[in-house]
Image (cartoon, rainbow, N blue to C red):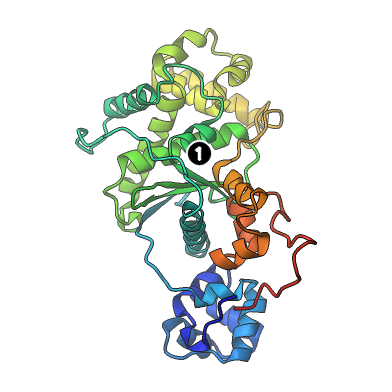
Amino acid sequence: MVRVKDENFNAKRLKEARLTRGLTISELAMEIDVSRQAISQFELGESVPKQETIMNIINTLNFPKSFFFKEYNEQFVGNTFFRANATATKKNKERQYTKTLLAGYIYDYLSEYVELPKLNLPDVSEFNGDWSDEEIEDLALRLREFWEIGNKPISNVVHLFEKNGIMIFSVDTDSLKVDAFAQHRKGKPFIFLGNDKDSSFRRQFDAAHELGHILMHKTVDNQEVLSKSEFKRMEEQANKFASAFLLPSEAFIKTVTSDSLLHFIELKKYWYVSMAAMIYRSYDIGLIDESRYTSLQKQISMKKMRKKEPLDDVFPVQHPVVLNKSIHMLLENNVKNELEIIQEIGVPQDQIEMLCHLEQGTLNLSEAEPELNLFEK
């Protein structure tokens, strides 16, 4: 095992690990019994923690020691689009953002051993970037044509995206206020879907919404500087794209033969989209008027279907498989063992298993392997 000297402790990695665990500088300082100023100096690179302090940091944050001694490489991460951003706290968004950095380390590592699907998205440069409703409808249809899926329902958006080179990660968002988020990266978009939501229909829409951001909002460098109206418009555009992509108007209209709540429940089985999304789509394209739309909304509230709709607990939630299979391939072909994967990526076992949607314990050290300290350098 390669050993490195303590003076190579990477200050930026400490901040990443701390934020991943949701700790403030003060909270970490209290946990390892040093001053707040000391932690701040460690993260700024103004001083290097002693060996004893490093071990306390490692044990508290539960990160492999190798993580803190790896070279820091810029990941070319663009804007992060947070779904439900308006109510998510800065602390929670920071915590989710650091998980995207861990996802980048995992992706870079697996790319060295596995040929991952190549990105396959249409060129949208001819659009002027204003994204009128008509342009969004056109974009959704163009993507369906590009992927040769016609007007058919999409039963598994997650697998469709993975097949076309969009990296999908599972993430525990630890908050009801963050459903999903996406990033523009150099040559590869990442989408993160929350494990905290247990509706396959909601996950379908979340994924499509994030793809809308990826296709339409590449030029947005930092959504934090947008005004409330600008942010709202951008979210509306992503919602419009998701609706148009999942429910192509021409085919959808033919299936809406009634405007009853029961009918929309039945249509979930065909379109794999939530009642709420289908009802709004029906209103948006003129199948139902405002009065009927309002009536259906009242019925949904009265029947307490706002958070959980009928059939939500019947259809299994779609999970990403590409990264999961990549890890298993390395293990099953004896390319790497569990310890090597954790140490060489430098990311904690629980985070690798979460982001790659591996069963908990997949990277437990097998009985055949010698017992080594995961926290060694």
Q: Around disc 1, counting alpha carbons within 10 Å, would you say few (fewer than 14), some (14 to 19), or many (20 or more)?
A: many
Q: Nearer the viewer, residue 189 or 215?
A: 189
Looking at the rendering, in which quadrant would you find the N terminus? bottom right
Residue at image coords 52%, 63%: 95
Question: With respect to residue 198, does 331 lie above or below?
Answer: below
Q: Amino acid at mark 1?
A: Asp
Looking at the rendering, in which quadrant would you find the C terminus? bottom right
Residue 55: image location, x then y, percent: 64, 84
Question: With respect to residue 64, does 338 lie above or below?
Answer: above
Residue 297: image location, x then y, percent: 55, 27
In which quarter of the view is residue 375 placed?
bottom right
Q: Nearer the viewer, residue 174 or 84?
A: 174
Give the total number of marks visible in the rendering: 1
Kindly tell me whether residue 174 is visible in this rendering.
no
Kindly tell me whether residue 227 is visible in this rendering.
yes
Q: Is residue 124 left or right of residue 321?
A: left
- What residue is shown with label 1? 206
Residue 236: image location, x then y, percent: 38, 37
Residue at image coords 42%, 26%: 245
Residue at image coords 50%, 70%: 16
Question: With respect to residue 108, does 236 lie above or below?
Answer: above
Q: Nearer the viewer, residue 37 or 3?
A: 3
Mark 1 element type? helix
Q: Is residue 94 left or right of residue 326?
A: left
In which quarter of the view is residue 313 placed?
top right
Residue at image coords 67%, 78%: 59
